[in-house]
Amino acid sequence: MTAAAEPDRSPVRRSRVRAVRIWLTLVAALIAVMVLVGGATRLTESGLSIVEWKPVTGTLPPLTDAQWHAAFNGYKQIPQYRELNAGMTLHEFKTIFWWEWSHRLLGRVIGIAYLLPFLWFLWRGAIGPEWKRALWGIFALGALQGAVGWWMVASGLSQRTEVSQVRLAIHLTLALIIFAAIVWTLRRLSDKPPVLAAARLKFTAIILLAMTLLQLFLGALVAGLRAGRVFNTWPLIDGALIPSAERLWFEQPWWKNLFDNHLTVQFDHRMMAYALWALAAWHAIDALRSRAGAAAGGALWLFAALSLQAALGILTVLHATPIGLALAHQAVGIVVLTLAVLQVERLTAPRPKDVARAVALPIGQPG
């Protein structure tokens, strides 16, 4: 047995990797919960209830009547209150406030849950240089996400009654990229062997992952425009399988339709869903025919999740986006992304000895 392979069998090393995996699993679970809370915040029209960004002092909610009235008076200054919620009571304001406050609090909790254990693992020498760069990169994306979140909220404080759907889509997509990066890292820290498969399977898996992220971005545009509350028929949309060009492209310049036209945005989301489902079916058939082992199972799970996601999407549209169906649709979207990431990783995984080199000294020995 080579010296490079020996540490793989060390109980101390296995314990160290297991501790890191538990930490990252908890962080990934928190991010998934935060995405769903963010979805509920959007669906309940709560995202603009806090009009200031106070990363530290904003951790505490209003604790006195005076503080509650001050927060409510701040909300009264923005267009959403004046145009949509004029006459709202303080009790009604508290309902939307708690959704947004919970969403922001979860963001802070995730930051602490990520950074403090990470620093501890670094201090104990539990993470090798290869993973240090990747994990610091994930932390940097998390810090950026906080700024992007405020950038999104700020878009709805002066001239709009809601946040920009483009900024919302960027905010959600960045959160999902962070989630995907953690899932990828978790898989790479496992001791599962790589799957030997044809290059075309790797290629289609990568395309499926890219299309999944794009589809989630398009779904966020639909959500941001409330476009799921119109054109509530299927398979027809606006009375046809493919709406007229005049209806799809009436805004100028033409590219604005991709972001602002309710019909175009929902139509794009539907067409991407069809393409994604068809490619996933082809990928699963190809993996089975190729007898690709674990990759065949992964392809079938991905296709099944996408089929469920498509069914939920159709039901959500037909029922004009009720909150329960909308959140279920979003939750299964996270599952689809997870399975897509795992499929790409298992088809491109390095050999176990490369994972072993990602870990430094045993826990208990400062680096």
Image (cartoon, rainbow, N blue to C red):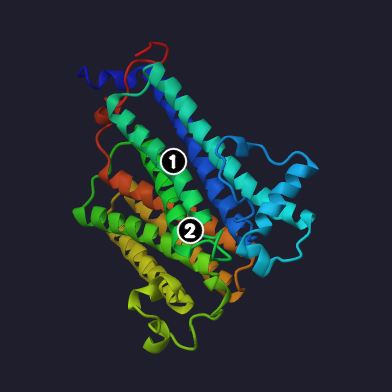
Q: Element under label 2?
A: helix
Mark 1 residue crowding within 10 angstroms, few (<14) / some (14–19) / many (20+) = many
Report the side of 314 relative to 7 (left or right).
right
Q: 304 or 53: nearer the eye?
A: 53
Residue name at image x 49 percent, y 88 percent? 239
The relative height of residue 131 versus residue 328 in the rendered view (above or below) is above
Disc 1 residue type?
A: Gly
Q: Quadrant of the C terminus?
A: top left
Image quadrant in which you'd find residue 66: top right
Disc assigned to residue 240: none
Which residue is under mark 2? 168
Q: Nearer the viewer, residue 160 or 286?
A: 160
The residue indicated by pointer 1 is 142
Residue type at tag 2: Leu
> What x and y, as percent, mark residue 118?
43, 26
Of callouts 1 and 2, which one flags the residue occurring earlier in the amino acid sequence? Answer: 1
- Where does residue 209 sit, x and y in percent of width and height? 34, 55
Q: CA distance from mark 1 to mark 2?
A: 16 Å
For this rendering, which residue is in front, 260 or 358?
Answer: 260
- Taking the spot 46% from the left edge, 53% from the top edge, the residue there is 171
